[in-house]
Amino acid sequence: MKTRRLPWLVTAPLVWLALFPAWIWLRRHERRILRVGRPLDFDECADARSAGVLQPETIRVAVTSPLPTPGAALLRGLAQVTRFPLDPPIGMALGYGIYLDESAAESRATLVHECVHVAQFESLGGRLTFLHRYLHECLRESYWTSPMEAEANRIAAEVCSRPA
């Protein structure tokens, strides 16, 4: 999908506007998932390692429907000036916590995709750095064509092409 990039002068202030409320939301929900979520099983840990996760034993998964999303009003406002999706996601990585929608609870590809995001946050050095880059890419490029999403899609496809 070819989309036009938004100018840096538009995206940079939007990222800074959304960054800290999104980080607070992320930390609150990550703590919840770590408290109530289940650990990865043996095969899922192997997939997470293949996706680049350094500490797969730390990951917890919570299945719920629909997935919570941060600041619906803020997201609606951002969506009006960007190409940020408003559809509820089927998976979401929040640090070492992963939300999966009930419809994707058994989807290996969705779980591996979210594990790639965990690996990205580990390699970038933390949640805030990850969130800043992720928001910037999604707002500037579009969610569907952002490099971090493309990497998660590519690696998930590679991992899932191998037997579990």
Image: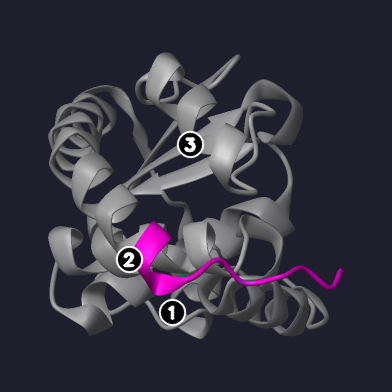
Q: Secondary structure at mark 2?
A: helix
Crowding at mark 1 (Cα within 10 Å: few <14, some 14-19, many 20+):
some
Q: Sequence order check: which comes first, mark 1 or mark 2? A: 1
Residue 49 is marked as 1
Marks 1/2 in contact by CB < 8 Å: the verdict is yes
Which image quadrant: the N terminus? bottom right
Q: Please, what is the three-letter code of the amino acid marked with disc 1? A: Arg
Which numbered disc, 2 or 3, marks the residue closer to the eye? 3
Q: Is residue 142 visible?
A: yes
Q: Nearer the viewer, residue 2 or 115?
A: 2
Q: Please, what is the three-letter code of the amino acid marked with disc 3? A: Leu
Q: Nearer the viewer, residue 74 or 24?
A: 74
Q: Is residue 102 magenta?
A: no
Q: Please, what is the three-letter code of the amino acid marked with disc 2? A: Pro
Which percent across, then down, holds residue 57?
27, 60
Crowding at mark 2 (Cα within 10 Å: few <14, some 14-19, many 20+):
many
C-alpha separation, residue under disc 1 versus residue under disc 2: 7 Å
Q: Name the residue beneath numbered marker 2.
A: 56
Q: Secondary structure at mark 1?
A: helix
Left or right, 48 with reference to 24: right
Left or right, 16 with reference to 88: left
Residue 78 is marked as 3
Please state the total of marks drawn on the protein image: 3
Q: Secondary structure at mark 3?
A: helix
Most common SS among magenta residues: loop
Residue 98 is marked as none
Q: Nearer the viewer, residue 88 or 39?
A: 88
